[in-house]
Amino acid sequence: MKSNLKRRAFVFACVAPAVILFTIFMVVPTFNVFRLSLFQRSTFNPEETFIGLQNFEMLMKDAAFIRSMQNMLLLIVMVTIFTMGTALLFAGILTREKLKGQNFFRIVFYIPNILSVVVISGIFSAIYAPDDTGMLNSILGLFGGKNIAWKGEQHVMTSIVIAMVWQAIGYYMVMYMSSMAAVPESLYESAGLDGASRVAQFFQITIPLIWTNIRTTLTFFVISTINMAYLFVTAMTGGGPNRASNVALFYMYEQKNKSGYGYAMAIGVVIFLVSFGLSALVNKVTEREVLEY
Amino acid sequence: MKKIIALALALVMALSLVACGGGGEETKAPEGDKTIKVAAIETAYGSQVWADVAAAFETETGIKVELTTDKNLEDVLSGPMQNGEYPDVVHLALGRPAGLTEQLIKANQLHDLTNMLATTIPGESTTPAEKIIPGFTATSATNPYGDGKTYMAPMFYSPCGLFYNAKLFESKGWAVPTTWDEMWALGDLAAAEGIALFTYPTAGYYDAFMYALMNAIGGPEFFNAITNYEEGAWDSENGQTLLSILDKLATYTHKDTPAQANNQDFTKNQQMPMDGRALFMPNGTWITGEMADYAATLGDTFAWGMTAVPGAGNAPCSFCWIEQAWIPAQAEHIAEAEQFVAFLYSDKAAEIFAAAGAAQPITGIADGMEGEQKMFYSIYDNGATSALGGFAAFAEIPGVDTSNTFFAPIDSLVSGTMTIAEYADLVKTNSALMRENLLG
Amino acid sequence: MKLKSEANSGERLYKIFIYVVLGLLAVLILVPVLWVVMASVKETVEHYGNPWALPTHLHWQNFVDAWNKADMGAYMGHSVLVTGLALVILLVVALPASYCLARFKFVGQKFFNTCFMAGLFINVNYIVVPIYLMLADGDKWLKNFLGNTFLLNNHVVVAIVYAATALPFTIYLLSSYFATLPHDFEEAAYIDGAGYWRTMLEIIFPMAKPSIITVVLFNFLSFWNEYIIVKTLVVDKDLWTLPAGLLNLMQAQQSAAEYGPMYAGLVLVMLPVLILYMCVQKNLTKGMTVGGLKG
């Protein structure tokens, strides 16, 4: 009896601080995002007026918001495809082939991931300069290419995709490498004897066997991309030119000051629901029978 | 257990002590020991001027000044202000991207300064009203609600205009245009040599430019019609002229401009007119200080020139960029803050400001200037009209604001992703909304 | 015989191709990073010219200017303080919690596990606004009762918020490790007479060292590089951390552009993480299989 009490006290002491912190700084604020979205609260007047779903009605008519959501979705799709595709491919090559300097490549590819987005935006500002002083344009010039206005309206989203993929690729590559390393070599050997090509081995052995890992990463990549897109846009373009690179979270922060907290939080709610829905969707679509090795 | 009780007791005592101390301070503070909080934007004039003026004020009145200066003052201020901690005096400008002053205007959170203007300046026998150049306290730049009451004291003013490389014009033998027809002709000449006619740092710089352009097209009447969102203003003949100039100018603008028109890369746009890739850019007199490092590298091939926005049916016009000092309605020490604002117009303060190149709208202030500064401030002597003010204040409309309606789309016009007809639709639709929500 | 040599040369071509592609990618990553380092020792005027030009001389003054005039020294101090404190709080709170959640059966265990899992889906950047409002309201209340405010502009509060918002990820990572341990360890310890606390602190935690290192590294990176939370919760600019201060320096308008000190600042932010990464990169990659997701 006494020992049971001790056990309870121990568990309580261990779990309580985490639960309290989690409740105060995550559960309550999340609840408040939803609550405030039903109110009008302007920036310099703490009075809150209940207005029901009016904020959402106005949002649906706000062209700038709709564009920012489109941009966000575009980034989620493009960055996911390019990051995951390239990361898987390179991870496959680096684990399967006996290459010299494997370790070197692994270390180098991971570097962008540890840099602050502030640093990355500084780097890409120099890379993307639209005239001859831009790194990218000066290289294109060597091959007779024309200068491209990378941060201009037509190309700004592509430029952000490139920067984001540049940043994320290493992380996912290194991660896939460590899960691929766990795939037993014997599977490849027998497949090799059956005459399966490298490509076939990759799709029939490697991918199915690390599918659980791919699935988890994809599910959470949605949220991470929403976040990163905001950080990149804040530092690189400020949403411009003329809102061409505006993304939903950036718009939320802008409207917090311009249209008040209620409106901003309504945007937050939409982002939250969309990101949750997308994660659930990805999770559902990628459902496969788990293969064991 | 004993320990816990003792601890709890100690805690309660400590808390009550702090509480009493906090309460006592406010009542006991002696009159002479008041401290006011002053927050000022740090621009090209530097932050030292404010420290000097604050020191002069302290010796004159005995009121202490706690000074904050920052380049992005809004970032520093808006947090505490939303939190109910207001500085007593703020020096800032309208038309900045963060729009802090505009927000306070909308929330009716500025203190009325009309009476302050008629009080005597500390240490002198004159009033600010007697010193300020007439006209400077009569526009929406100081009287946001159009009711004859001044809520913002006019501080540093600088003529805005089109900046260019005077040496380049000299060497090519080109004349600086005074009408838009001459402007287009020059644009074609320059294009033949691979030079663009126009560029701008960010689309935000279109505000001063467009205000001046409105005046250069249809005078103050047209300017007021547009900035008060009057019905049909954009459809009038003048409105059509304005649209057609904006449209044509977009095609004459350096194509790299929008790609660099963001907070990170705008400096590169400012280099364009300096090294001959574009002829003109709209800017203010602070540009000389801002780009001084770069100007030094150019040597003899470069010297700043500034001209008014060319006329199109009216005289050329130069918008007057003006920074304002104001007192938040919720400031703690309003009376002392008023003294401080009044003191800003004292001879002592004006001298300190002028020494740093900051010109206040005080009669006779521009007389003592030299060199570039003199050229800039003499722009109005050479036939250009002046314009002050800007878009009228309106109540919060979610998703709609002036900068994203009138100025930001310029990027799209230049990129060719928006037609002038689409731009006209946008400004007309949003003007109608703003008209419905006008304040005052 | 002939067939085999053909296969071999195809193999060699393939290998060369792979090396070229990998090498290219490595160049794409290394060149920009090294370029920033080079830019940080150029004088401001040199930045107006060809970006590939080598610096005329090593202008170390940039670092001195960044450190003193642009306040990077103070920012660096704040960064160290906030990051360090947040990591300590996080470990003290998350380690015991993950251990219990993974290895003890108790009422509500399933519920809490689900809650923390759900927390993985909460994007920190949009709950920052309500957190700010909550702290601001708290400060107003404190001002009325104590005449003093201390929730905003407080590095300790920022550290707590960092730690709290990193909890779901950290608990997820740590408990998935603790769940893999066989129960024999504890049983043996209990038989030896060790209590719950001693067992946890002296037997279990030391075994979890690789996982703990991974957690520390990941969270170090995210805390060190963070600037949204700090810019929102710390309204006094003088108290900002390195990335926040740097962004401010990069985007200041209407005042003299200072490229030299700016790039020096970028290097100052970058250097600590690069050094740390070089030292511990083995551990970092080892721990990653556990996660599969990112904080």
Image (cartoon, rainbow, N blue to C red):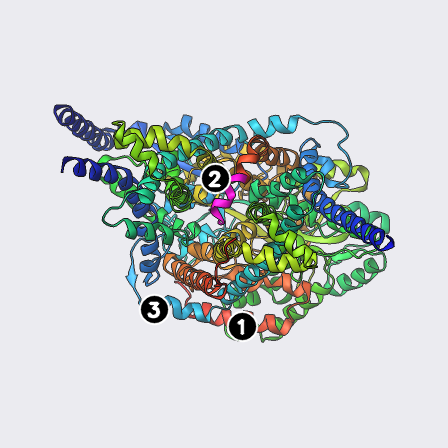
For this rendering, which residue is in front, C108 or C66? C108
Q: To which quarter of the image does residue C142 belong?
A: top left
Q: Amino acid at mark 1?
A: Lys
Image location (x, y in percent) of residue C178: 38, 41
For this rendering, which residue is in front, B338 or A138? A138
Question: Is A241 contained in the magenta span?
Answer: no
Question: Magenta span: helix, strand or loop, mainly?
Answer: helix
Q: Which badge, 1 or 2, comes first in the chain's sequence?
A: 2
Quadrant holding the C terminus of chain B = bottom left
**Front: mark 2 or 3:** 3
Task: Look at the numbered discs 3 and 1 and tell me whether their residues touch, using CB distance below 8 Å.
Answer: no
Query: Marks 2 and 3, Cα distance to the nearest angstrom?
Result: 40 Å
Picture layout, residue A39 above or below residue C208 = below
The magenta span reads C286-295
Picture layout, residue B230 above or below residue C144 = below
Check residue B310 in the rendering and tell me which mark sits there, or answer none: none
Image location (x, y in percent) of residue C257: 64, 39
Image location (x, y in percent) of residue C144: 23, 40
Q: Is C29 placed left or right of C118 in the picture?
A: right
Q: Amino acid at mark 3?
A: Leu
Q: Which residue is identified by label 3?
A: A53
Check residue B40 in the rendering and tell me which mark sits there, or answer none: 2
Q: Which residue is identified by label 1?
A: B428
Q: Amino acid at mark 2?
A: Ala
Picture layout, residue B128 above or below residue B9 = below
